[in-house]
Amino acid sequence: MIKIALTGPECSGKTTLAIELGRRLDVNFIPEFARHYLNTLNRPYNKADLDVIAKKQQQGISLIGRTASKYMVVDTEMLVLKIWSQEKYGEVSPYIQMLYAEQDFDLLVLCKPDIPYEDDLQRENPHDRDRLFDIYLAELQKSGKKFITVEGSFKDRVDKIIASI
């Protein structure tokens, strides 16, 4: 099985690409759990919520990973939670650090935020996406994990991912 995960700053096209890759590869993609969680939370989120989100995201990945055959497409992985936590709270829990260190994808797709920003209630960094992208890029370069960067048009992004698979 080829495991593909999308990563990058908010509003960089991860979900749109995950949906399209799922369609092209004829698989169900694993959605970002944070959106569901935050939409049902009846209070502002806090640092402890990030561990809950990480746990549920990882459970979804593990569940699908046991039944997937040829491909697995994941919208958002633990680097997102690691950087989110570091940026928001100045630290990362040992749990998120462990999940990030243990995650094993065949291809990480870093999405460049060179698309128009779409505001919603969960997004917090409309003017900081390029700086955050640089943090993602540096972390992936340091990690030694296999990754590609996608940018430009939707078609260019999808074509590059499909060619990389």
Image (cartoon, grey):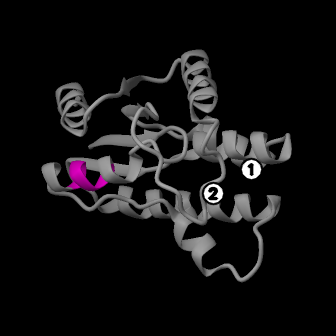
Residue 25 located left or right of residue 30: left
Q: Nearer the viewer, residue 98 or 42?
A: 42
x and y percent of residue 153 in the render? 25, 34
Q: Is residue 43 above or below residue 5?
A: below
Residue kind at label 1, given as amino acid type: Tyr
Q: The N terminus appears in which quarter of the rendering?
A: top left
Residue 85 located left or right of residue 28: right
Q: Look at the numbered disc 1 and give the secondary structure of its residue.
A: helix
Q: State if disc 1 and disc 2 touch (CB < 8 Å).
A: yes
Q: Is residue 6 above or below residue 140?
A: below
x and y percent of residue 136 in the render? 58, 29
Q: Which residue is mark 1?
A: 95
Other-residue count near label 1 (Cα within 10 Å), few / some / many at <14 / 14–19 / ≥20: some
Residue kind at label 2, given as amino acid type: Ala
Q: Residue at x 30, y 62 (%)?
A: 67
Q: Which residue is mark 2?
A: 54
Q: Which residues are magenta?
A: 18-22
